[in-house]
Image (tube, rainbow, N blue to C red):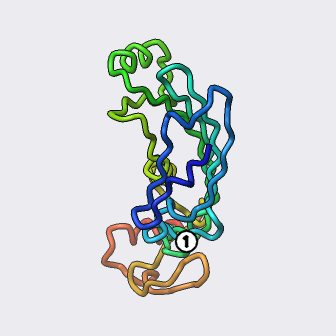
Amino acid sequence: FHPLRHADPASRTMKLPFAEISQETSRLTFSGAGWFPVDEVNCSEVPLVEIRVRRKGKKVLLEGMLRFCPVLPCDRCGVAVASPLEEEFEYIFTLDEKQAESYEVEIGDEDCVTVCLKEPVIDLGELFREQVYLAMPAKTLCSEDCRGLCPECGAVLKDERCNCSKGNSDSPFAVLEKLRRKE
């Protein structure tokens, strides 16, 4: 079967009809062309998705691995950081709403998502983009000990020394700094 035959580069969709999915497990690999949100996520290498898909009656089982390396700003100092990410995902697609509800209860695994479709077609592009957004970290740091920026002069404190706030006695913490220096 050829899911790319259904790709529409203008709308960034890749349609996978149930009828083209075998009962034998098929392995497919997709690079970032066409489905990756390049206008929103900058990457240092080509994103890659590998999926295993098979049909079982009226259901389609899809397991995948997403690999990409977004370049994100450090949340403390703003320095660009390449963060390699690898995310596994699993979906069960069905056309039967009642079957979807009972199957979710039967599995009970939060990593497994059952999706009830109105028509027997899976939009792989939408699925892959969703996985990209779910894999993005909530916080990015260039290093655990990043001290961020100087609040007065904006110096990156891990790279530069700054004396801006050393003489500021208006701060309620200035007394604590004096005690620390005595030790």
* Residue identifier under label 1: 181
Q: Foreground: 32 or 45?
A: 32
In the rendered image, residue 144, in percent from the top left (x then y), is placed at: 60, 59
Q: Vertically, is 19 above or below 13? A: above
Q: Residue at x 60, y 30 (%)?
A: 54
Amino acid type for the residue under numbered disc 1 = Arg
Identify which residue is drawn at 53% across, 66% down: 180
Say which residue appears at 63% left-offset and 56% top-offset: 48
Total number of numbered discs in the rendering: 1
Q: Quadrant of the C terminus?
A: bottom right
Q: Residue 121's image quarter? A: top left
* Mark 1 nearby-residue class (10 Å; few <14, some 14–19, many ≥20): few
Q: Nearer the viewer, residue 129 or 34?
A: 34
Q: Find numbered disc 1 in the image and state the secondary structure of the residue it sits on.
A: helix
* Image quarter (top left, top right, bottom left or bottom right) of the N terminus: top right
Q: Residue at x 47, y 48 (%)?
A: 15
Q: Give the x, y percent position of residue 114.
A: 43, 28
The image shows residue 32 at horizontal and vertical percentages of 58, 62
- As drawn, 158 above or below 24: below
- Nearest the eye: 11 or 40: 11
Closest to the observer: 135 or 23? 23
For residue 90, side relative to residue 120 (left or right):
right
Q: Position of residue 111 (x, y in %)?
A: 51, 31
